[in-house]
Image (spheres, rainbow, N blue to C red):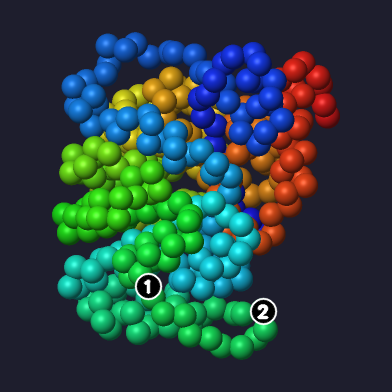
Amino acid sequence: MCCHLAVRHTGLHQHAVRERQRFLPLSRRLSRRILSDSIKTEAVMLFRGGSTLAKKFFAGFHCGGHRGSPRVAPENTIESFEKAKQSNVDLIEFDLSLTKDAVAIIMHDDDLERTCAEKTPVSALLAHEIVTKNAAKNFKFADGKQKICPVPTLEETVKYVRDSNLKMLFDVKDGSKEMISQIVNVISKNNLYDQVIVSSFFAWVPYAVKKADPKILTGVTWRPYFFSYSDIENKHPRFTGLKHYLAVLLDWINVKMIHSFLPQFVGAEMVLTQERDINGCFVDDMQKKNIQVVAWTVNDQRQMMHFVDTLKVGGDFLFQCCPHQVNYEVMMKVCIIYALSELGWNIQ
């Protein structure tokens, strides 16, 4: 099943431009202001990255590969990124972890069990050890053959994606100073300011990145009960006893901050929100601050139509686990239905 991300963002309001833009996948409409400007702080003004880079980053971004194309190749590998590239994606998303010797590598989990069939923690291995591991160990290829797909480093991945002329989304789970330093260095060294956005569940990551280099685009990722449960179904608590209830309290506080001031305070240009927790009011509230709203995961075409037609979440930005299965005919239908509905036509 595909995993999509749908994004809605601000744009031009001129009538002539809108008549043309209605029939493009990107739905641009100026959102209303709800929150008082008095809430803005000097820290926000200091760390905001400027709208020009953000507009350039999101321009032409229609489809992204979530960890590459993990249904046809092992996630977070060059092979998976290549499959996504062959599916004509515009962006590659990948996860960053840090090795024992503080080298950034591409890995989602804290250990190698799910991908490499080893229970060793990533932080217990040196870089030269982990890059020899086979990230395809537990992957079932369509032809039934076993293949070797090494764990790539951040440097290797950035070079591949940059040379492929694709955009990047760094999903950061390690908020250490070493990780922040490597992220900032690789972006500045390669002048990737309009090609990379850095996002994390931990708000101090975009804050620290902005503080180190205000030009880098950042995002805040969130879902309910992230700190108290390790899964999106909320079946596996991270802690027991009193610690669990403290984590639940932290989740409640986090939700309040996300909906009020946190993304703007840390200078984020984007908020990634679990699809079942997104609504029109939240989208409008974020957009009045020029913050992109991203819904994850929109798993099927009908759900995509709901986001575009009912919630008015633009159908231009799609983040997928299986970009090779994208039904572009249906996607175009979604965009046309949205455009006609904006013209006053009631299309069922």
Instruction: Give above or below for 259 relative to 95.
Output: above
Give the residue at x 57% y 55%.
Answer: 89
**Type of amino acid under label 1:** Pro
- Marks 2/1: CA–CA distance: 22 Å
**Type of amino acid under label 2:** Ala
Please tell me which residue lies in front, 211 or 158: 158
Q: Can the viewer see residue 110 in this picture?
A: no
Q: Crowding at label 1, few (<14), some or many (≥20) Cα neighbours within 10 Å?
A: many
How many marks can you see?
2
Quarter assignment of residue 134: bottom left
Q: Position of residue 122 (x, y in %)?
A: 29, 73
Q: Is residue 274 left or right of residue 209?
A: right
Please tell me which residue lies in front, 248 or 140: 140
Q: Secondary structure at mark 1?
A: loop
Q: Secondary structure at mark 2?
A: loop
- Please tell me which of labels 2 and 1 falls first in the chain: 2
Please tell me which residue lies in front, 211 or 61: 61
Instruction: Please state, as top left, top right, bottom left or bottom right, where the C terminus lies in the image.
Output: top right
Q: Which residue is mark 1?
A: 152
Q: Crowding at label 2, few (<14), some or many (≥20) Cα neighbours within 10 Å?
A: few
Give the residue at x 19% y 68%.
Answer: 102
Q: Nearer the viewer, mark 2 or mark 1?
A: 1
Q: Can the viewer see residue 131 in this picture?
A: yes
Give the residue at x 39% y 23%.
Answer: 289
Instruction: Please state, as top left, top right, bottom left or bottom right, where the N terminus lies in the image.
Output: bottom right
Give the residue at x 51% y 29%.
Answer: 9
Q: Position of residue 190 (x, y in %)?
A: 30, 55
Q: Position of residue 279 (x, y in %)?
A: 55, 28
Indicate which disc residue 142 carries. 2
Instruction: Give above or below for 277 relative to 72.
Output: above
